[in-house]
Amino acid sequence: MQEGRVLPAKQINADLLKSILHSPKWFWITIAILSIFVLGAVAAAGLMFNKGLGTTGLNRPVMWGFFITNFVFWIGISHAGVMLSAILRLSKAEWRRPATRAAEILTVFSLMTAVLMPLIHSGRPWRLVYWVYTLPFVPYDFARGVWPNIRSPLVWDPSAIFTYLTSSILFVMIALLPDFAVLRDRTTGWTSRIYGLLAMGWQGNPRQWKLQIIAGVLLSALILPVFVSVHSIVSWDFGMAVAVKSWHSTIFAPYFVVGAVHSGVSAVVFVLILLRWVYSWQDYIRLEHIDALGRLLIVVATGWFYFFVMEVIFGFYGREVDEIAVREFQFTQAPWNMWMIAFVGLTYFLPVALWLPRAFRRNLWIMSTACIAVNIGMWLERFMIIVPGLAQKQIFTFDWYTYAPSSIEIVIIGGTFAMVTMLMLLISRVVPLIPLYDIKEGNILKTEIQIGRRTVPATFRED
Amino acid sequence: MAASEHKRYAGMWVFPEASQITRDVAGKMAATPRVLPLVLTGAGLLFVLGIVGFIARAVDDGFDDYMDWGYYAAIFSFIFMFSGAAPLAAVAFRLTKSHWRRPLSRISELFAVLGILSTVMLIPLLFVMPPINNAGWPGPGAEEMELRRTIWFEVPFGAPLTWDILGLVFLTVCGLGILWLSALPDLAECRLTATGFRRKIYNFLAGHWFGTKRQWNTQKAGLAMLGAFYFMLLIFVQFVIVSDYAMSLVPGWKDSILPPIYTLTSLQSSLGAILVILYILRRWGGYEEYIGISTFWSASKILLGLTLLWIYHTFAFFITFWFGRLEVEQNIIKYLFVESYGGIFLANLIFGFAIPFLILLWNPVRKTAWGPALAGLSAVAAAFLFNIRIFVGSFNAGDIFDIGLSKVPAATYPDVWDVFMVIGGLGAALFIYLLATKIIPILSVWETKEGAKYQKMGTLIKGEYLILAKPE
């Protein structure tokens, strides 16, 4: 038996456009609270720019701390969009439909947030201009061969991230065209005109649908290499550095990508549960969808755990004294060993234990707990990769140091979480976070087959 | 309903009649194609040649020096690689409830019988392998290590050899368990039609299977549990084999991505081998009514994904070593990728990536039977080259107790006994697989029948379309 009802198109429009056409009271109150956090972060960043990086906990040799950890974390979250939208679209997974839009938009916002982190970390973001230009509009003369080094992974980063950001925005916009047209037709005045512009003349004729589908599939396929390259290149920021012993590992690229998918999909599941709750979208984000995402997460988490184990085993395998010193630091010395236990427990053992029973996968409280646990764990993972390695980077023990974040760093990091939440809420006032046309298409293709005395859910296949 | 009645899906999806499947498959099994004895004899002869090569190598060089056994290790690893991973195709696609998997389930499970061959082939390697302890260690400060690099850090009891063979034995038993459990309903069907000695075999193998609801539930739960166990065991055994019999033999080779690359190569080559067999069965085996193009189409997308993952992981390895500029890493790249085994690596790259990618990139080609099969054949060839490069290279990399690979060794070419052992291994694998198909139906009859029930034609707007059911 099908779990969801087949709803008429009119009701789908009414339900899914509710977040745009009506504003509940809690909405602006929540936005106001989140704004306070964001403004706090802006003020903290301003203070840090004014006083210098000395206000942070960064020191020699731990030059990378919370900001870079947060950068890697948000890049990771951005991987949900492609995983849920592009890959599941290509594999024709029916249960993907309500999750795609939220995942794609979360991708865009998390990427935008990630980009901010290295800028803030630089301490003097306006000097970024020297990375590209010597004088206004005069490109930097690379022939001098001093700085910046275009062969450095740190230069590959912005190229990959901006390519991913551009293609992700394009991906969202293409998917939004039919929904913009619906909004154009259901709004009035300047709002209708803006939606009209965004809909780019969409009338829903067969040719437009055909082109939209082709564009979606093509973009899904083309975005995949970009998706993989982004986190691979971020991983190579670390992996190419032979001086930091625990970083120079060949597995870093796939390990980071799988970890990113793990945290990104978990974040999307949590966002979906929130959306279902705040907008009463029980008919659209159904328990079967959360269940399927839970099953996907078991596979992703196990893949991630495999890469994690390989990374650790081969850390010890080399029998290099300085690398073993870092590993001992991570695994045996407090408080790092406690963080390590928390990270592995929260990233793998707790969530997978919660995802295994079907009843748990269909319990939204349990799923939310598991998904939040994954994201806390994944944040800790990045922290545990970056800081212990740097703290014991030098061969001489008198150069070993540790790192404690300052309140400025904590406020800024907290602000990024508030910012992404706020942006997600604000965008829900502008675009439907569940794609209308995708849900309608799913309803059309949905049917049932009678086998003996049982009614089994089924779908129409075009090819 | 015949396929021709659904023109939109002609060839793509098959619509077998549930009532005819048993009789048809039993008929196909009873009738021995003229070419089969010929192939069996050829494979048997190669098998014998392999045994001759093995005996000659043992007599000539003994088991004292592992370096002489590089090609033997390579062919062992190749057979283990694709045969070990193949049953996972049935397990994984059954778990995802993919309808297109049905024709390939049994083909993939039958590879489990090759686990017996892999296990037997591992035994001589256990005698050949060098110890972990450096008996002649000159002491601290020397350019040698007291213990060679190994995944068995504290050298637990019997490590590594006992654990290696135990892992492989458990994997083989588990694989055979999956095959038997999955084939149980079909063996019971065969029991009804067979006569004489064959009937006795089927009686023994089918046990008390009568197809009760309880039996079906137990079978499905058992398959899921064994599948999960098999998956974990396979990953572990592959990690052990590639670490103990390859990486740890190259001084200074510390490469955390090699086990995933090995696993990916095994998944790619096993799916490739399955596609080749599917093509042969469809084209010449008389199974066209049961194997639709949709199976090739869907499997080809997985093969394309695996191909891309393989090149991605290989590139991730290469760029990290290349960019790191450490002497030992540069030497390993030169040895296994660029200079000594550069030619084989290039061929490996062409067969493992370029050819499958260029074939599978095109949807119209993916929607044929020959395209995916050709790409699969290429992937199998690539896996063969991969094993030659990695295992022969590792077995001949020099002093295993050195801290790092300080110079680039030359490539090792096969002698006549090596050639005999390599082709003998391939012949043995073919021989054993073909024999197994004479006992167990190569088409999963019960899954095909089940699939026939889960599909029907229905009207959507103005057209007739296929409806596929997906029970929870």
Image (tube, grey):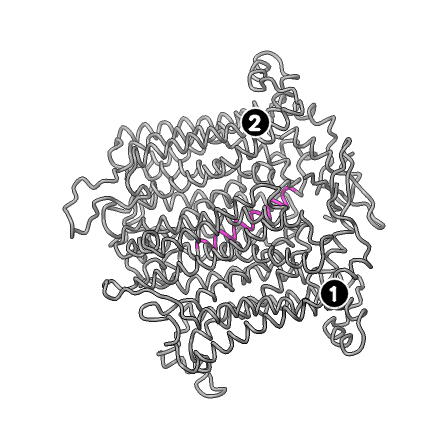
Q: Nearer the viewer, residue A411 or B233?
A: A411
Q: Is residue B309 magenta?
A: yes
Identity of the amino acid at label 2?
Answer: Leu
Location of mark 2 (residue): B181
Q: Is residue B470 left or right of residue A248?
A: right
Asked whether the residues under marks 1 and 2 belong to the same chain, the reply is: no
Other-residue count near label 1 (Cα within 10 Å), few / some / many at <14 / 14–19 / ≥20 = many
- Is residue B351 visible from the viewing direction of this image? no
Q: Is residue A108 above or below residue B99?
A: below
Q: Chain of mark 1?
A: A
Residue at (67%, 68%) from the top-left corner? A27
Q: State the residue lying farthest toward the bottom.
A: A135
Q: Nearer the viewer, residue B182 or A120?
A: A120
Location of mark 1 (residue): A179
Q: Nearer the viewer, residue A147 or A72?
A: A72
**What is the x, y in percent for residue A145?**
36, 78
Q: Is residue B57 left or right of residue A426?
A: left
**Which quarter of the picture shows residue A83?**
bottom right
Which residues are the magenta region?
B295-314
Residue at (47%, 39%) from the top-left corner? B232
**What is the x, y in percent for residue B71?**
35, 39
Q: Is residue A44 magenta?
A: no
SS class, disc 2: helix
- Is residue A127 visible from the viewing direction of this image? yes
